[in-house]
Amino acid sequence: MIPARIILHEVGLRDGLQMESQVVPTERKIGWLRDLAAAGLDIIQVGSFVHPTKVPQMADTDQMFRELTAPGAKPAGVVLSGLVLNEKGLERGLACGVEMFCMGVSASETHSRKNTGMSVAEATERIIAIGRDALKAGKSVQVSVQSAFGCGYEGPVPPERVLGIVRRYLDAGLTGISLADTAGHATPAAVTDLFTAIRGMDGTAELTCHFHNTYGMAIANCYAAMCAGVQCVESSVAGLGGCPFTKIAGGNVCTEDVLHMLQRMGMRPDVRLDLLLGVARDIAAFFNRDMPGMVYKTGSISQSSSDSLP
Amino acid sequence: MIPARIILHEVGLRDGLQMESQVVPTERKIGWLRDLAAAGLDIIQVGSFVHPTKVPQMADTDQMFRELTAPGAKPAGVVLSGLVLNEKGLERGLACGVEMFCMGVSASETHSRKNTGMSVAEATERIIAIGRDALKAGKSVQVSVQSAFGCGYEGPVPPERVLGIVRRYLDAGLTGISLADTAGHATPAAVTDLFTAIRGMDGTAELTCHFHNTYGMAIANCYAAMCAGVQCVESSVAGLGGCPFTKIAGGNVCTEDVLHMLQRMGMRPDVRLDLLLGVARDIAAFFNRDMPGMVYKTGSISQSSSDSLP
């Protein structure tokens, strides 16, 4: 049973852009973000509070938040999220106007150590402390498990390990939970099993899925996740994305392709697909290459049907 | 509940190649077909009995069947199917060794008239007669409804129209039924509804799905179809394909990407993914362009995991 209203969380400007070597100027990113907000997406991830020298593409995150949350400048009806990796990130985020804090740990020891220098257990306790601090500051919080369906380094990740981390989150009062398929290893069956298990642990948790299309299964996995009661989908406009810390980077599931599917199933008619397609075309032009998204190339079905009338 | 054994019907050499202007030499096609058969695919569509001047890529279909079914030449363990459009096609197919006859009608009046010059009702009665003749000749028969989920010309196709054609097929004793999403309009919800309705009409019919990835939903639709009890998936190696008679041609769902998903879910471990990837790479090299398939580019997950070991 798919939830009546699927929440769309755009992560292209963060997860999508962080692997691109061509740095996008701040004003261009803000322009895209304003168009995405005007389209009616619910949450938009502005950037990541990583060290500026580590991911140059994210060096302007604080500045973007300040510009976007200045009096009168805030796009209407959208929540602005930011990814934090540590206490310093939380401090920066609280100072520049982040509305929703996203953070997480990897379920893979190898991925966790490469990404954070910490074991999974250490990282979990640290993230929980940061998440609780963000909650205390009155912010929305989403905690995630990365590599939840497998790891590019380690291969299979035991579901029990993922569920153990989720248990810790829930016990700590952190009920906005995302499972991220960093390496693209998820299958619809694994997605169904894992999210159904979490739903069984807490019927009221707000569940989010985050899939990469490395092996072509991302939209199928979104569908399976929604059928298992997941309320929120993270996606990237144009299908931008990939993680520079995993060996094989595949783009995030594509926002406008997901929306197109939802609208064809009668859901989210309030979101402006045409505006999303415009941003996707602009991104393809900026990077001067085809992006993974399908619908921005073919046009939506309603467009193509009317185009083909005699 | 996904059927325990999903049957894989390769249609790339027919539906995939018919839209390619660069004609593939017969010996090359036979080489690909032998590799696909060696990989363990269950059914392979050799070609179409269309008029040779209409689709030059299919002009050697009779010759291919003769070579492949000559004494001692037949690849082991595979069923060779052929698409027939009319009585003449059945005659040709019976003369050259076709083992399984595939035929169908479009549920869209516009698509039907463009494809066959007949109304849906006329085409249905004619196909039923041909199908019964093929059955009488001791052959396997699959009857399909094309544009079953929408039409590039007409837009939405009422489910009742599709189910009415299926009803006629079943009443005529034709129980191998395929729904083809010629224009790529299907959604997982529509797939679930339509196949569940057919399953309700006849619990023992052999159901096949045929999806194009025009809007990125093909694998999600396959998953939904299998969950609704569909036993057979039609797909194209490398994601070749598209229909020259619909306005926007999207490739068929990609065989090796579907198999990769199935194997990740514990199904069809008997099929050799590596051989399929080899054919996909050879096809990409032959046409000298990237094909839509994902896994032939990234490598399968087991490969990538072992590759990333230090």
Image: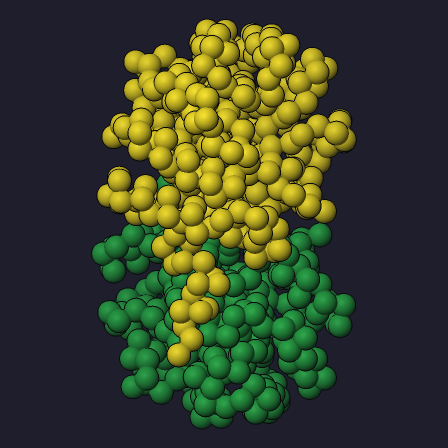
Chain colours: A green, B yellow
Q: Position of residue B293 (x, y in %)?
A: 40, 48
The answer to whether A149 is drawn above or below residue B294 in the figure is: below
Q: Position of residue A198 (x, y in %)?
A: 70, 69
Which residue shows up at 47% across the image and 41% down it?
Answer: B38
Q: For the view shown, which residue lies furthest in the front direction?
A: B72
Q: Is residue A34 visible?
A: no
Q: Is residue B281 visible?
A: yes
Task: Say which of A123 and A44 sits in front.
Answer: A123
Seen in the image, is B55 located left or right of residue B273? Answer: left
The answer to whether B62 is drawn above or below residue A242 in the figure is: above
Which residue shows up at 27% across the image and 44% down it?
Answer: B285
Task: Say which of A292 and A100 sits in front.
Answer: A292
Q: Position of residue A140 (x, y in %)?
A: 58, 78
Which residue shows up at 75% across the image and 72% down it?
Answer: A202
Task: Indicate the quadrant where residue A47 lies.
Answer: bottom left
Task: Say which of A231 and A240 sits in front.
Answer: A240
| Numbered disc total | 0
The answer to whether A187 is drawn above or below residue B181 in the figure is: below
Seen in the image, is B99 located left or right of residue B160? Answer: left
